[in-house]
Amino acid sequence: MESLENACRYSVVVPMHNEEGYVRPLYEKLRAAMQRLPEPFELLFVDDGSTDNTLSLLAELVRADGGVRVVRLKRNFGQTAALAAGFDHAGGEIIIALDADLRSDPAEIRLLLEKLAEGYDLVSGWRRDRSHEGWLRTVPSRVANWLLAKLSGVEMRDFGTTFKAYRRELLRDLRLYGDQHRFIPVLASWQGARIAEVPVSDSPREMGQSHYGLERTVSVLFDLITLRFLMQYISRPLHLFGPAGMAGFLAGSAILLYLFVEKVVFGVHLFLTHGPLLILGLLLFLSGMQLLAVGLIGEMLARTYFEGRDKPVYRVERVLGGARLTGAARS
């Protein structure tokens, strides 16, 4: 039998953490949606260290359906790491990712695939109507998406959704960490990827609680700072710290040189005559030296990061399933 990695056309990746109530309905809707496609597919669930019955329910699906695979992580590493694990274990040429809470309709996967077939490398869902979330969540989200689009140059309306379709070759070179799943379109654009959006529905969560609350909006500012740094300075941090450090160093040096001349040539008592200026000169000189040192250390860390970036951001406990394909073209 042809191996899964060589024969599978589509992989659907779903990160899950304590989603026992969604396992069965999500599986049924995903399978119904994917069976409408002519090519073989797999359903790959990543259990991100769930403490409820999520894993046992997923194991039942593996026993009943050979097209289901489960990657169990050793602990809760977070959504970015769970997606990275799913991408690394996916065998499909085209990879579709979505959250487990059924806010994204699996039936709309076809919309992403139709757009992807036009020659795009990444197609993202755009949740047009999110009024059910209330203005306390929708307004900050819209502002954040607008700022991300302006800062990154990637014209998208919705960076936060997981509901996306990717070509495998695009994900092969991506190394995700932190909360970078929100920045995947930006990271992809640096690789020259063609990116598009399609409108999709967004339904209220029917059971359980969202893993993201209002406190998530507080991190928007840090996300923007991170994005700006990643865009311009991740490979050259000295260019970020260097100008301020050099300015402080030169200004401090000039002040200290002036005070040295005053002391040596004119015999001025520096502490009585130029006390504040002396302190300012010392502070500028020392802070400039520190910023330059931070920039140089950053350069060394960046070099270490880019040369040793094969280190995974997750640990797999075990993988279930993967023996057979599923779909209309199954052999």
Image (tube, grey):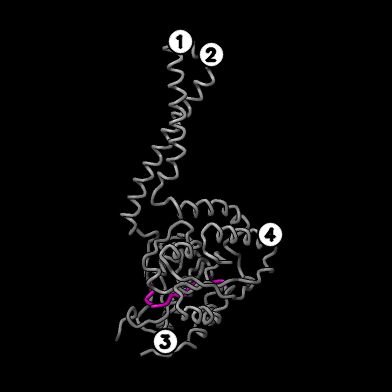
Other-residue count near label 1 (Cα within 10 Å), few / some / many at <14 / 14–19 / ≥20: few
User: Between marks 1 and 4, how big is the CA–CA gap?
Assistant: 65 Å
Marks 1 and 3: CB-CB under 8 Å? no
Instruction: Give left or right: position of 324 versus 221.
Output: left
Residue at mark 4: 136
Mark in front: 1 vs 3: 1
- Whole-percent x and y of residue 25? 55, 79
Q: Mark 2 Cα within 10 Å, few/some/many (few <14, many 20+)? A: few
The disc, 2 or 1, on the residue closer to the chain's N-terminal end is 1
Q: Which residue is mark 3?
A: 39
Q: Is residue 98 part of the magenta span, yes or no?
A: yes
Number of other residues with Cα within 10 Å of mark 4, as a class: few under 14, some 14 to 19, many 20 or more: few
Q: Residue 245: x and y, percent?
A: 44, 36
Say which label, 3 or 2, has the lower sequence index. Answer: 3
Crowdedness near tag 3: few (<14), some (14–19) or many (≥20) residues, C-alpha within 10 Å: some
At 64% across and 58% down in the image, what residue appears? 140
Is 31 magenta? The answer is: no
Amino acid type for the residue under numbered disc 1: Phe
- Above or below, 85 against 106 in this view is above
Q: Nearer the viewer, residue 14 or 108?
A: 108
Query: What residue sits right under mark 2 in the picture?
Result: 273
